């Protein structure tokens, strides 16, 4: 059985249960039943509005966002599903900072809960740079089911990878 790279930090028992679901061909079905509802956030403008609404509701006092976009290169180049950056520019005698959030374009077609999970994760980085206890407390403040959604998101990414491997196989669906 192949290693589950998205689930590497989880217990061997849990990984074995996921491997069983994969072997039985039930992982995709299970996820589709639980998260069958797609979102309507298809372009960068809609994504910006979506992120701004969450930010205004939960992080009113945090720094403003300059840009929020889907990034097709993100997953391949940065090995990340979302990034947050601060870009500093000198304008005359002042230093201006602009914050950006980039979301991997794989989430353009993902279930609504998974887009929300990635957005919550990146918004939490506006206040907490490190993945520490305070960071995860902020994530669960914004999204109470954050930990379950993060685990299910990892299952979803595993399923996507399996589907891509199947399509790439000679004689696979193309």
Image: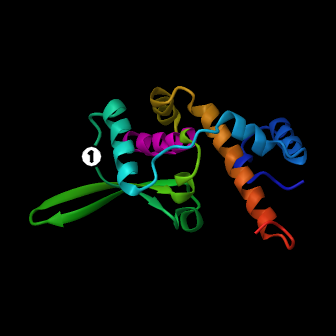
Name the foreground residue: 109 vs 64.
109
Residue 162 horizontal side relative to residue 88, left or right: right
List the residue tagged with mark 1: 64
Total marks drawn? 1
Q: Nearer the viewer, residue 112 or 85?
A: 112
Taking 104 as reference, is 30 above or below it? above
**Lateral position of residue 29 relative to residue 170, left or right:** left
Residue 130 appears anywhere in the view: no
Outermost residue on the bottom side: it is 170
User: Around disc 1, counting alpha carbons within 10 Å, would you say few (fewer than 14), some (14 to 19), or many (20 or more)?
Assistant: some
Quick check: 14 above or below 4?
Answer: above
| Screen quadrant of the C terminus | bottom right
Asked which quadrant contains residue 166, the reply is bottom right
The quadrant holding residue 148 is top right
**Residue 129, percent from left and from top:** 43, 45
Q: Position of residue 115 (x, y in %)?
A: 52, 44
Query: Which residue extends farthest left?
Result: 93
Task: Give the camera-side residue of 103 and 84.
Answer: 103
User: Magenta includes 51?
Assistant: no
| Residue occupying image coordinates x 39% and y 56% | 44
Image: magenta residue range: 113-131
| Place of residue 67 in the rendered image (x, y in percent of width and height, measured from the top left) | 33, 56
**Residue toward you, 81 or 39:** 39
Q: Residue at x 55, y 68 (%)?
A: 77
Q: Position of residue 40 (x, y in %)?
A: 47, 45
């Amino acid at each position: 059985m192949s290693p589950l790279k998205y689930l590497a930090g989880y217990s061997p028992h849990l990984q074995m249960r996921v491997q069983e679901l994969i072997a039985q061909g039930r992982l995709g079905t299970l996820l589709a039943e639980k998260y069958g509802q797609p979102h309507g956030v298809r372009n960068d403008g809609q994504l910006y509005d979506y992120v701004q609404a969450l930010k205004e509701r939960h992080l009113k006092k945090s720094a403003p966002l300059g840009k929020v976009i889907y990034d097709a290169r993100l997953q391949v180049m940065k090995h990340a599903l979302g990034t947050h950056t601060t870009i500093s520019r000198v304008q005359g005698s002042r230093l201006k900072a602009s914050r950006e959030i980039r979301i991997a374009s794989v989430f353009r077609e993902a279930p609504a809960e998974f887009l929300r999970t990635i957005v919550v994760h990146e918004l939490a980085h506006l206040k907490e740079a490190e993945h520490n206890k305070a960071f995860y407390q902020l994530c669960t403040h914004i999204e109470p089911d954050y930990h379950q959604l993060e685990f299910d998101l990892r299952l979803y990414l595993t399923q996507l990878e399996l589907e891509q491997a199947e399509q790439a196989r000679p004689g696979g669906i193309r």
